Image (tube, helix red, strand yellow):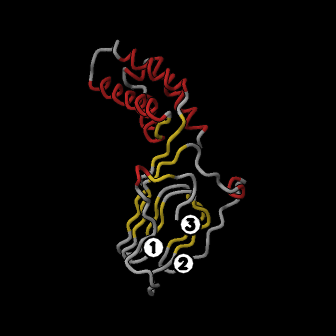
Amino acid sequence: MTTGMQEPEDGEEAVVGTAESSAPQEGVGGISVGVLTGGAVAAGSGATAEDRSRRAGLPAPVPPSYESGRPPVVPPAVPGGIRIGVMAGGAAASGPHARALDASTQLIDASPELLAAVGTLREQLHLLSPSDETTEVDAQLAEVEEEIDAVGQVGRGRLQRLRERLDLGATAAAGLASAAAVVQQITQLLGSQG
């Protein structure tokens, strides 16, 4: 069961909740979900759950009762199964051979300011003495530029990794003013996307 704004990647279908047998088994249970806005869930012997979707834009909204600070309503326990109050992505599995995989990617609409800041940083990196660090940062920036040029969006995980790399502050690349501008643009995009 998956919900939210998801499209399978390149013709792939998300496999969700498949099991060796559809007949109920003693001690192997069902699934009880309060809210699920992505991801995959499976329960039962040999069950598997997989989500390889690409989510574009904002994640599905969480119901207002959860945003108000009240604790989520967790569904009643399911013998041998899974119970989830709120799940916004991820994967869950239960059972002796259960397997859950969330290989989904959330894409964020890239701003022109981010693209400009990335371009400026790449130009300034070439002014530094070549090193493994500058080569690695330049490669990460090039990947961001290519993804934005291709689809106008960039993966949330890619942005988070780049921000962490530049936010360390102990490297030559992180000391550039243009690196601070890239980190600021990434932080604004990630903050506005939930």
Instruction: Tell which of 101 and 177 is nearer to you.
Output: 101
* Within-10-Å neighbours for mark 2: few <14, some 14–19, many 20+: some
State the residue position of label 1: 43
Q: Which mark is residue 84?
A: 3
Marks 1 and 3 in Cβ contact (< 8 Å): no
Q: Mark 3 to mark 2: distance in Å?
A: 10 Å
Q: Which mark is residue 78?
A: 2
Give the side of residue 68 with respect to residue 9, left or right: right
Q: Mark 1 to mark 3: distance in Å?
A: 12 Å
Quadrant where the C terminus is found in the figure = top right
157 above or below 35? Answer: above
* Residue 149 horizontal/vertical position (percent): 45, 29
Instruction: Tell me what residue is drawn at x 46 percent, y 60 percent.
Output: 91
Mark nearest the camera among 1 and 3 is 1
Instruction: Tell me what residue is drawn at x 37 percent, y 77 percent.
Output: 20
Which circle's residue, 3 or 2, is located before the other in the chain? 2
Residue type indicated by callout 1: Ala
Instruction: Tell which of 189 and 12 is nearer to you.
Output: 12
Determine whether the residue tagged by mark 1 lies in a helix, strand or loop.
Answer: strand
170 above or below 59? Answer: above
* Residue 82 horizontal/vertical position (percent): 51, 71
Instruction: Tell me what residue is drawn at x 51 percent, y 48 percent.
Output: 55
Q: Residue furthest front?
A: 11
Which circle's residue, 1 or 3, is located before the other in the chain? 1
Instruction: Tell which of 92 and 59 is nearer to you.
Output: 59
Which circle's residue, 2 or 1, is located before the other in the chain? 1
Determine whether the residue tagged by mark 2 lies in a helix, strand or loop.
Answer: loop
Residue type indicated by callout 2: Val
